[in-house]
Structures are given as C-alpha cells and as structure tokens.
Amino acid sequence: MLRNVPLIVILGSTGTGKTKLSIELARRFGAEIISADSMQVYRGLDIVTAKATKHEQSMAKHHLLDVVDAGSNFTVVDFRDTALPIINNLLEAKKIPIIVGGTNYYIESALWKVLANPLNDNRKRKIESVDSDDGKEVDANKEDSGQWYATDQFEGRTPAELHKLLQSVDPDSAQRLHPNDHRKVKRALEVYENCGKTMTAIINEQKNIPGGNDYGGPLRYEHIILFWLQCDQEILNKRLDSRIDDMLSQGLVKEIRSFYNLAKQNYNKAKVDATKGAIQSIGLKEFIPYLEKYDEQEDERLIDFLTSEKATDQSPPESLLLLKSCLETLRLVTKRYSRNQPKWIRNRFLRSVNRQVPPMYTLSTNNPDNWNEDVYLKAENVIQSYMDNTTADLKPCEQLENPRKDLDPNVTNICETCNKPFVGEFQWKLHLRSNKHKHQLARLKKQKYLEESTVSGSVTENSLK
C-alpha cells in the first residue's frame, strides 16, 4: 500500500553537504527544494552565504532564494507564510517538497504550529496608556480600549526598557525570557501589538490543541522524514576554513560592498544598522569594520593587489590586514555556530518531551569519497521505503534523555552574587555549579573579609599581599 508523498527536511551544521543532498534527492524523486536559510533569501549574497550556484539551481527547482533586497527585513513569520503555500501546493500535486537549510527556527515554523498569526486588519495595539479625547486616561491594555496605532513603538528602547514593557502586558513571557534576549522580548511585544493577545495566551491555546506540547502546537503534516547530516567537528572545521579561504578569490569584497551600499540606500542612512536585516547575520556583520573604514576605491586597490602576480614583492595594503581580521572573526563565529546547530537538533527533536517528532535519520558526511554509499543511497532508500510502506535499511534515531524534563523552564532566578538573571531551573542549576559563579563567590568573600578586617584594624600590610 502506497503512502502519501512525504515532506523531506534536511538538517545539519553549515558545511555538511545539505545543498548537495537536496539536489540529488530532488532529481531522483522529481521534488522541489525550499530554502530555509535566513540569509539566502537576500539577493546579491551568493558567495558569503554559500548559496546554490546558478548551475545547481538549474538542476532542480528552488524556492525562497533571492526574494528580498538588501535593507529589507525578512522574519520567521514571513518565511512561514511564504513557505507553507508552496509546501501545500506541492503535496496536493503529489510532489515531494524538500526543506533544506540551517536556520532552525525557520524549519520549526514550517513543521509545527508554533507561531502567532497577526490580525486580519493588521491593526496594532498601543501598549502604553494614552489620553482619550475627553482628557481621561484610557487603559490601552484592555481589549475594549479601542486604542490602536501604526508606528513602531519599540525603536530606540533599551533591552531593559523593553523587558519592563513586556512585564506590564505579558508577565509570564517576561519571566520566561531573559532580559538581554532583545530579539525574543521584542517578538513577544510585537505579537501582542499585532494580535491583540499575549504570547503566553497564544502558546497556551496551541498547547491545548490535540498533539500540542510545551513548545506549542502539533505537527502540521502527517508524513515527514528528517535527515540529519553529521560531520566530526575537526573535519568540519577544515572544510569551513577552506570555504572561507576561497571567498576572496570568488569575489567576496565586491559582493559585500554592493550589498552594504544597497542596504544604506534602502535604509536612507549614512551607516547601516547592524542590528537589522541580513547585516546582523553571520557572514556580514563581521565585515562592518572594513566596510565602514574603506570605500570602493580601496576595494579596487585591494583586489588588484590580491590578483597581481607581483603581490609577493609588494607590501600589503593596510586594508588587507583589517579584511583578514574580519575573515578570522568569521572563522571563529562560523565554527561556533556549527557546534551549536547540533545542540538545537538534539534538544528540539531528540530530547523533546511530549512533542510529536517525525522519524529522524542520521547520515555521516565525514568522507566525501564515500558520499554515495554513506549519504545518498541511504537517504534514497529511506524515502522510497517510506513511500512503499516498507521497512528501510537505516533505523531512525532513538529519543534521548531530557535533563530538563523535571525542571520548570519558566521560573527566573536572579544571582545576587553575579548580578545576572537565569531563565529556567536548568540554566540556574548549571550556573550554580559553574566555575565563574564559584570564583565570584570566592572573590566577594575575600573582599568582605578584607573590609571587615580593615574596620576592626586587624589587617596588616602583609595580610593584604
């Protein structure tokens, strides 16, 4: 008995070969590819995002590549609202959609019902109190206040101010979110602003839907297959170094300059806001120091030096030193990001509690010479077996023990010793066991002893050494 065609999702750290596998599977099964990469949606960012080349794109139909200009904001809600109709249309046509990418919350928004939907009329609720026409103060937080507005009330506010504002309208979300997590705090405020409901109320509604869980609502689709491409970190680091080394020869300087200038033009500012749009992403923000200090003329001098056969006989321009420093920063953050991506996969899929999780299959990409046997043929067998309703040769991953399962994720503890808040009991317990906390305790204890001893006159010159 044949099953319905599945939705395929390819996960994994950057540099593990997700693009290669997606194209191979798309050609084999007549599928179409949906990019779930928050940077590859931007036009003009091909090199720095390792986007599928034009030749690769011609081998299979791709969606959500090159759909947004520099300076524009493209959010997870934009991704969800654009990707879901594509997925639904493909499934209705009995064609396999393949979601591929490394932006984890994009992927999650497509698989589960976890995001709030804005009001149909796109009105925005004013969170702070306002004065009515008759001079009486109106509580704008009440559903019947009738106070709405259409401007961004969150611009220019500090993280502490935004968190305090969130406490006034959604104290449960404020307790759950770290005050310094500016993006999530602002998102919770925007949900209330756009939906007329708090994030907490929406999440609770989603949890109560059959199949809901602590993260939100149930799966959107019944037939899903997950492939997790894995690679040993030492091997992956070498690949990432090689990729970054190749960027300069591929035209990195011209690409980032063109995108940066267009972003400035669209924002209509002398400098680009490094906290908005694609500029804030890994791969671009690292180059802001170079882009702000030098102009196109220096770019040309730098490119001439790099491509000159006599470059070894010349002194490198000062701009090259700064550019290399930016590249070195990119190496560090890219490797750190590649180490963090698997943590999200384990926590959200393999360590989830009471969550509907599709079968996940791990594929090793350590050895490129064995790609066909280790990766492609195994993935092909899993998909074909699923569609034929037979048992695949490869077994799916088993669920892992969740260290947070008996701990409250919503409670916030303030460490008076370190003057830091910690959201969730798990993070709190980790902090209390950390060397940083213990060192701070020891330092304060010593400081207190010295102060008390000084007051009592028992501290000698030698005891302070």
Image (cartoon, helix red, strand yellow):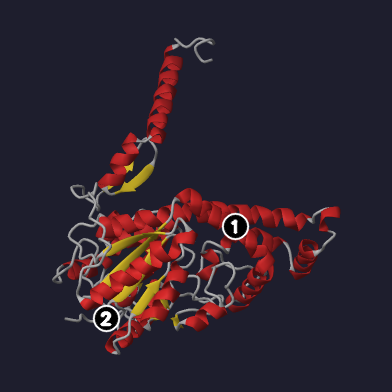
Residue at horizontal 46 percent and vertical 65 percent from the top = 17
Q: Quadrant of residue 390?
A: bottom left
Quarter of the figure with the C terminus: top right
The secondary structure type at the circle numbered 1 is helix
- Residue 453: x %, y % from top left: 43, 15
Dot 1: within a 10 Å radius of its alpha carbon, few (fewer than 14), some, or many (20 or more) residues? few
Q: Is residue 377 above or below residue 444?
A: below
Residue 149 in view, yes or no: no
Q: Which residue is mark 1?
A: 242
- Residue 75: x %, y % from top left: 42, 73
Three-letter residue code for mark 2: Val
Residue at horizontal 41 percent and vertical 27 percent from the top = 444
- Residue 423: x %, y % from top left: 31, 50
Given the current orientation, which residue lies at the most extreme bottom position?
Answer: 93
Three-letter residue code for mark 1: Ser
- Residue 204: x %, y % from top left: 19, 66
Residue 311 in view, yes or no: yes
Dot 2: within a 10 Å radius of its alpha carbon, few (fewer than 14), some, or many (20 or more) residues? many
Identify which residue, 419 or 249, lies in the foreground. 249
Q: Which mark is residue 426?
A: none
Quarter of the figure with the N terminus: bottom left
Q: Which residue is mark 2?
A: 5
Identify which residue, 253 or 18, lies in the foreground. 18
